[in-house]
Image (cartoon, helix red, strand yellow):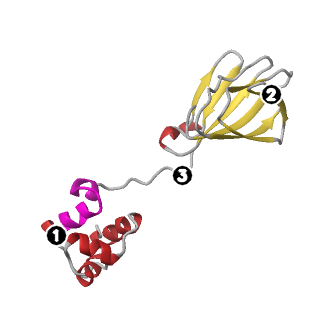
Amino acid sequence: MEIGKKVRKYRVQNNLTLEELASRCELTKGFLSQIENDLTSPSISTLRDIVEALGMDLSTFFKEESDAQVIFTHEDYFIDEKEHSKITWIVPNAQKNDMEPILLELCQGGESFEVLPHEGEEFGYVLEGKLVLINGDEHLTLAKGQTFYIKGERTHYFENTHKQTAKLLWVCTPPIF
């Protein structure tokens, strides 16, 4: 493990200059620079002071970061099928992310779940068929290739009043699905 690189990474994340962090730890700027460049190793006591000045403890500092999954396949998806609808969570556990995308499929007569007003925004792209977006009192028809972008200020949902199955890529931030 390259301790110096981690110290620099967390210092930058905390928007601290080398001088500011050195001052908080009662170290010289030069010594802290040597640590960040892995030219010297700090004592455990000194490292604890640095890490605490960065707002964490030693166990958090030494915790190995796992690489976040970037690519997802059908094997990763979670699917919820109902009589006239199918929801596919195409990024599993997206609640921990800033956005949550789903793939919504509605057969004729199908309706999505109702989304209550929330602090966020939503985007959708119609992949197949036609859908009606009921957004408060508005009824807006969307066809293949069209998109929508709304604030989560009003109760809303989708329905398919057409014969062809409709597919919608629907993304919400923050996650609410």
- Dot placed on the residue nearer the N-terminal end, 2 or 3: 3
Question: Residue at the spot x=79%, y=29% of the render?
Answer: 166
What residue is pinned by disc 3? 70
| Position in image of residue 68 (x %, y %) | 46, 51
What range is drawn magenta here?
47-62
> Which residue was labeled with disc 2?
138
How far is the residue under mark 1 from the one under mark 3? Answer: 36 Å
Amino acid on which the number 2 mark rests in the picture:
Glu
Whole-angstrom CA distance, mark 1 to mark 2, is 62 Å
* Secondary structure of the residue carrying numbered label 3: loop
As helix, strand or loop, the secondary structure at mark 1 comes to helix
Q: Residue at x 75, y 19 (%)?
A: 110
Q: Quadrant of the N terminus?
A: bottom left
Q: Position of residue 53 (x, y in %)?
A: 26, 64
Which label's residue is closer to the chain start, 1 or 3?
1
Picture layout, residue 88 above or below residue 9: above
